[in-house]
Amino acid sequence: MLALLLPVWGVINLIYGGDWNAEYVYNHGVKGTGVIVEVEQTNNYVNHVQVVNYHCLIKTKEGKTVKTYFENSGDAFYPANDLEIPPLVGESFSVKYIEGDEENFIILTNDRKSGFSNKLNCTKLLQEMVSAQAKYNFDKTNAGTKRAFKHLVEKFLQAPCDTNLQNVYRMQLEELKE
């Protein structure tokens, strides 16, 4: 019976293993920081997308620096974010890692103290807001689209996003109040 279950377990692990690991590291890992130091394109492709290795340094809570990398095809971002935009070279980010196995890490997408995490969340919020703005501009008489757009503008103005862009939408919000 066990011999029959092992191949099934292997397939399930291939499909969900990365997600399970990311959740485990998120719940049981230790917080640290990381920085991208090099981006390397490979000759490998997954689903017609070129695999890219992002070489980084992780600083542990003890101050130890660990050299490691992650791939754009992996589960490096947690909680999962639709954008999965990697940090730029030199850009720092928050991580959680397993103590004693520091190469097993995730990049935190919900750490409000991380500029990278804020950039991801602001980009997603900006996409939602621009979509709502297009709907509102298409039919300014629709109270529902106006309300949805206004709500997203207010949410964007509360987020730690680009202040220049926020000033533009602050003026837009004044127009919506009329």
Image (cartoon, rainbow, N blue to C red):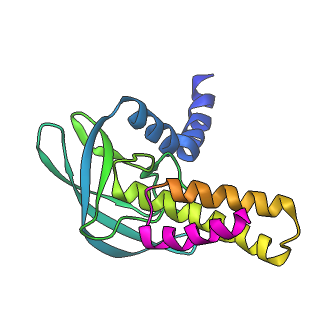
Horizontal and vertical percent position of residue 27: 42, 31
Q: Determine the main secondary structure of the stretch shown in magenta.
A: helix
Q: Residue 133: which quarter of the image?
A: bottom right
Count the numbered circles shown: 0
Q: Residue furthest top?
A: 1
Question: Which part of the image, by quadrant, shows the N terminus?
Answer: top right
Instruction: Judge from the rendering whether residue 171 lies leftward or rightward of residue 114; answer left or right.
Output: right
**At x 44% / y 64%, what residue is drawn?**
72
Q: Residue furthest front?
A: 178
Q: Is residue 39 magenta?
A: no
Instruction: Judge from the rendering whether residue 52 lies leftward or rightward of residue 165; answer left or right.
Output: left
Establish if 104 lies above or below 132: above
Horizontal and vertical percent position of residue 158: 51, 53
Horizontal and vertical percent position of residue 56: 24, 60
Establish if 101 lies above or below 125: above
Residue stretch rendered in magenta on the structure:
160-178
Question: Which part of the image, by quadrant, shows the C terminus?
Answer: bottom right
**At x 40% / y 65%, what residue is drawn?**
86
Residue in front for this viewpoint, 78 or 9 = 78
Residue in front for this viewpoint, 19 or 123 = 123
Q: Residue 124: which quarter of the image?
A: bottom right
Instruction: Judge from the rendering whether residue 133 lies leftward or rightward of residue 119; answer left or right.
Output: right
**At x 83% / y 72%, what residue is drawn?**
140
Residue in front for this viewpoint, 178 or 54 = 178
**At x 44% / y 50%, what residue is drawn?**
109
Horizontal and vertical percent position of residue 71: 39, 62
